[in-house]
Amino acid sequence: MPHSVELITTIAAALGLALIFGFLTVRLKLPALVGYLLAGVVIGPFTPGYVADTSLAGQLAEIGVMLLMFGVGLHFSLEDLLSVKKIALPGAVVQIAVATAMGTAIAMMWGWDLMAAVVFGLALSVASTVVLLKALESRGVLATPNGRIAVGWLVVEDLVMVLVLVLLPPLAGMFGSAPADTHAHGLLTTLALTLGEVALFIGLMLVVGRRFFPWLLWQVARTGSRELFTLCVVAAALGIAYGSSALFGVSFALGAFFAGMVLRESALSYRAAEETLPLRDAFAVLFFVSVGMLFDPNVLIERPLQVLAVVAIIVFGKSLAAFLLVLAFRYPLNTALTVSASLAQIGEFSFILAGLGVSIGVLPAAGQSLILAGALISIALNPLVFRAVEPAQAWIRRHSPRARQLEQRDDPLAELPADVAAHTLTGHIVLAGYGRVGRHIADALDAQGLSYVVAEQQREAVEKLRARGIQAVVGDASEPAVLIQAHVARAQMLVIATSDAFRARKTIEVARALNPRIHIVVRSHSEDEAALLRREHAVEVRVGEQELANSMVRQIRERAGARGATSN
């Protein structure tokens, strides 16, 4: 009796067609993920020809989401998460409320009942994990303040959606025949239990997981087996994600994210990220293919105006809400545009919520089709939305006096105290960026008693620096106003510790315009990028891997020289 090869066939068809369509779309100057989505449409149940197993593809895509969130967690510390809580928590909650209200209003205009309209609005309010992270990684801004805000915003959205998925069935039951007080009691009980389970999971991961899993990773690494090490990393990622879902009701993605955060405590976290990178990329492709498989092209013909309305809410409506919210929290224009672009799409949680709504009878099948259409189109458009961030920023500043006024508003953190600037800041160092690298540089400057000013986009970080008596200004160092406030014209050196190469170039140009003789040191991730910066801007560039190698060589020479002197 022949054995089933459906899994192999699905993977082979998905990856093979994704390669073909991805290559074609890249040659046409379109994002590769558009090709992946088209590959899914081709092998989906709504187009002629071979039809892949949708359930298998969905499970493979879920693995991709888990591995991707695990990778983000490996580079995202608890400190990073807490540093953006003041904007991510209220911002995400208000943005979900605004997007849900917009979706609810338009669905009720179509004649849907209130429950169906609310579920529809909620499905349009939450962004896709995979799309957001891929967009931030492709632009090299995942580790920047803007990237940390977007990821923190995403984590809050995931937590909210976990609660929504748990509470939706009892909420739907409130429209039944049981007394209202019975439903209210059941709803409050369910809410309390859910919050308790989530809190217990997070507590266990932060208290127990941060000690046990790094220790386990180190024990496996001591065996010297690369296969065992990779197996340990993947098993920890998937095991924690599954366990969190089965025991605590937390989503796979959120469980995997916390798995990465606890493994980050290990000194081997960088190696763990590198070992899982090929798997993360392959399964991320399967995610986009699975999205395409769910899409029925007929909805574009049958309901074109409704599809346009859904896309408008996703791409423009909730993005505008996020944009205004970030500005309201007094963050720079670039941060507002980056976060709003990050959220201008929907994905996996929207599919899950739509599927649950249909299964319990509160969302019509047409609603699910519209949500899937909105997801496919918004995901395809998202790279183009990101490309529009810089032109939009320039256009807004050029045409909106209000926007320029907002960036020059009376913000006590946006400028240094006048007495400090006048008497102490001459021949100082300007440090652009106070992330993980910037903090180490600042500690070294403190140890040597050198005067410096920090320019950082995170308001919370600037507040803490001011409280410690360290001079700091909030804002993007690539903006002239920020470097002027840091008194770069009187500085002897500018140290750029951020990982965004594009902003580093802008910062160099602005600094040279304000102080042509300033010495500039830049952080870089690659030799090619470093060579380009040296050639175009004549700056001193430090590459992480090269500096690590140089440090190891110096230590080898010192130890070898000490042994040679002893032997003589």
Image (cartoon, rainbow, N blue to C red):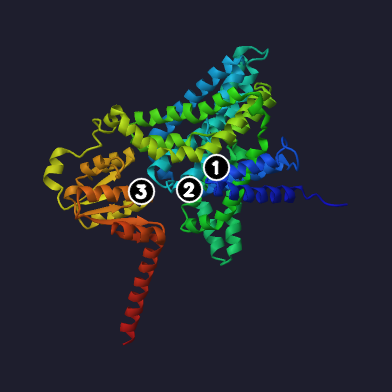
| Image vertical order of residue 439 relative to residue 457, above or below | below
Point out which mark residue 480 bears. Answer: none
SS at mark 3 in the image: loop
| Image vertical order of residue 362 relative to residue 416, above or below | above
| Image vertical order of residue 165 relative to residue 475, above or below | above
Q: Type of residue at label 3?
A: Gly
Question: Dots 1 and 3: beta carbons under 8 Å?
Answer: no
Q: In front of the other: label 1 or label 2?
A: 2
> Between 144 and 342, which is closer to the camera in this rendering?
342
Question: Dots 1 and 2: beta carbons under 8 Å?
Answer: no
First of labels 1, 3 by sequence position? 1
Q: Residues within 10 Å of mark 3 (few under 14, many from 20)?
A: some
Visible residue check, residue 160:
yes
In the rendered structure, the answer to whether residue 138 lies left or right of residue 247 reads: left
Point out which mark residue 435 bears. Answer: 3
Q: In front of the other: label 2 or label 3?
A: 2
Q: Type of residue at label 1?
A: Val
SS at mark 1 in the image: helix
> Between 442 and 279, which is closer to the camera in this rendering?
279
SS at mark 2 in the image: helix
| Image vertical order of residue 562 relative to residue 229, above or below | below
Whole-angstrom CA distance, mark 1 to mark 3, is 24 Å
Residue at the disc numbered 1: 130
> Between 334 and 231, which is closer to the camera in this rendering?
334
Q: In front of the other: label 1 or label 3?
A: 1
Q: Which of the 4 quarters of the picture holds residue 554?
A: bottom left
First of labels 2, 3 by sequence position? 2
Quadrant location of the C terminus in the rendered image: bottom left
Residue at the disc numbered 2: 138
In the rendered structure, the answer to whether residue 385 lies left or right of residue 188 reads: left
